[in-house]
Image (tube, helix red, strand yellow):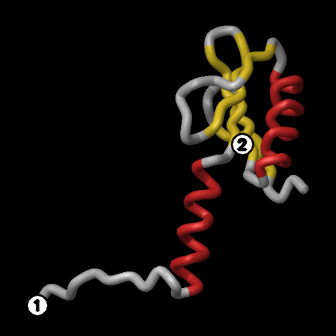
């Protein structure tokens, strides 16, 4: 079988839309439970932005950040599973 070289046209609308979605997803904010506090952090960073005692307070803060940056917000439960996703926070 003949191998076909993998080529992408970065100007193709579908590829450009996919690339933009990936980049946007890397900057999304997450509210996660760590230890005994709720942490707000970006998807592309291991460093927490801020810690809160309640999930609600963390979500409000993270929603404001996500709105300013034009990214999505993912709120996780205590078990780590996503319980809420908020897009288009303008």
Percent across and percent down for residue 31 are 72, 31
Q: Between residue 70 and residue 40, name the one nearer to us.
A: 70
Which residue is painted at 61% across and 30% down in the image?
A: 80
Image quadrant where residue 83 sits: top right
Badge 2: residue crowd in 10 Å (few <14, some 14–19, many ≥20) = many
Q: Position of residue 85 (x, y in %)?
A: 76, 48
Residue identifier under label 2: 74
Element under disc 1? loop
- Residue at the far top in the pictured view: 36
Across and down, in percent, residue 57 comes to: 88, 23
Side (left or right) of 83 relative to 44: right
Query: How many labels were placed on the picture?
Result: 2
Is 8 drawn above or below residue 26 in the view shown?
A: below
Residue furthest to the bottom: 2
Q: Is label 2 in a helix, a strand or a loop?
A: strand
| Residue 73 sits in quarter | top right
Residue 29 tag number: none
Give the left or right position of residue 64, taking residue 26 as reference. right
Reading the image, the residue beneath label 1 is 2
Write the residue at 62% across / 53% down: 25
Q: Quadrant of residue 1?
A: bottom left
Q: Position of residue 14 (x, y in %)?
A: 56, 82
Name the outermost residue toward the left. Answer: 1
For marks 2 and 1, give the CA distance.
Answer: 43 Å
| Residue under the image location 71 percent in, 42 percent down | 74
**Mark 2 vs 1, N-terminal side:** 1
Crowding around mark 1 (Cα neighbors within 10 Å: few <14, some 14 to 19, many 20+) is few
| Quadrant placement of the C terminus | bottom right
Task: Confirm or deny contact between disc 2 and disc 1 (CB under 8 A).
Answer: no
Residue at position x 67%, y 21% from top?
33
């Amino acid at each position: 079988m003949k191998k076909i070289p993998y080529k992408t046209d970065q100007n193709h609308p579908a590829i450009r839309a996919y690339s933009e979605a990936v980049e946007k997803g890397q900057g999304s904010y997450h509210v996660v439970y760590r230890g005994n506090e709720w942490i707000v952090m970006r998807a592309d960073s291991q460093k927490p932005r801020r810690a809160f005692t309640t999930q609600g307070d963390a979500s409000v803060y993270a929603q404001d950040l996500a709105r300013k940056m034009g990214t999505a917000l993912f709120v996780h439960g205590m078990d780590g599973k996503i319980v809420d996703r908020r897009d288009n926070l303008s």
